[in-house]
């Protein structure tokens, strides 16, 4: 019997963990999310590219030392499956009620039976994007 293929919702849960760790300033959660064995890379906004878990976690430790005053939102996350073990999430990042001002690419790979981050890249948009209007829910 082969294991069940992880669903796109599992990828989105891992992606949400990333934004929760950032917003809560939770370095331990951030470190747990990043892959330990696969090659990893990260490009923070307006920063040079980083390679290797140690270098990346050092920057996250510095960034998360003081949690941001507002929550970082992930808007319009879209999963792009490359295989059963690799997925890309593209999204927009915004703070508080302000329009999204960054575009982000988050890449996840299955490691140790769960989705782990192998790449994060966020960079400024040419102009902010307003949040999509909320859809009414039917009861």
Image (cartoon, rainbow, N blue to C red):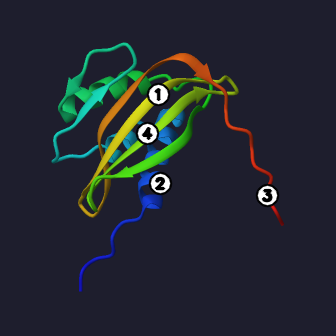
| Residue at disc 2, secondary structure | helix
- Circle 2 packing at 10 Å, graded few (<14), some (14-19), many (20+), is few
* Marks 3 & 4, CB-CB < 8 Å contact: no
Comes first in the chain, label 3 or label 1: 1
Pick the residue in front: 74 or 78.
78
* Marks 4 & 1, CB-CB < 8 Å contact: yes
The residue that label 4 is drawn on is: 90
Comes first in the chain, label 4 or label 2: 2
| Residue at disc 4, secondary structure | strand
Q: Which mark is drawn over residue 29?
A: none
Comes first in the chain, label 3 or label 4: 4
- Circle 3 packing at 10 Å, graded few (<14), some (14-19), many (20+), is few
The residue that label 2 is drawn on is: 13
> Vertically, is 42 above or below 132?
above
> Vertically, is 94 above or below 20?
above
The residue that label 1 is drawn on is: 103
In three-dimensional space, the C-alpha distance between marks 1 and 2, rounded to whole angstroms, equals 19 Å
Specify the quadrant of the image occupied by residue 54.
Answer: top left
Q: Which mark is drawn over residue 137?
A: 3
> Vertically, is 49 above or below 77?
above
């Amino acid at each position: 019997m082969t294991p069940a293929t992880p669903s796109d919702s599992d990828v989105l849960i891992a992606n949400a963990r990333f934004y929760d760790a950032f917003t809560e300033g939770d370095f331990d959660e951030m470190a747990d999310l990043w892959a330990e064995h696969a090659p990893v890379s990260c490009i923070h906004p307006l920063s040079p590219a980083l390679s290797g878990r140690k270098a990346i976690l050092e920057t996250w430790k510095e960034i998360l030392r003081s949690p941001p005053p507002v929550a970082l939102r992930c808007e319009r996350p879209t999963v792009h499956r490359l295989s059963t073990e690799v997925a890309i999430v593209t999204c927009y990042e915004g703070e508080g009620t302000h329009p999204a001002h960054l575009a982000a690419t988050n890449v996840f790979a299955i490691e140790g039976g769960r989705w782990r981050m192998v790449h994060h890249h966020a960079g400024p948009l040419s102009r902010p994007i307003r949040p999509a209007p909320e859809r009414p829910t039917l009861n």
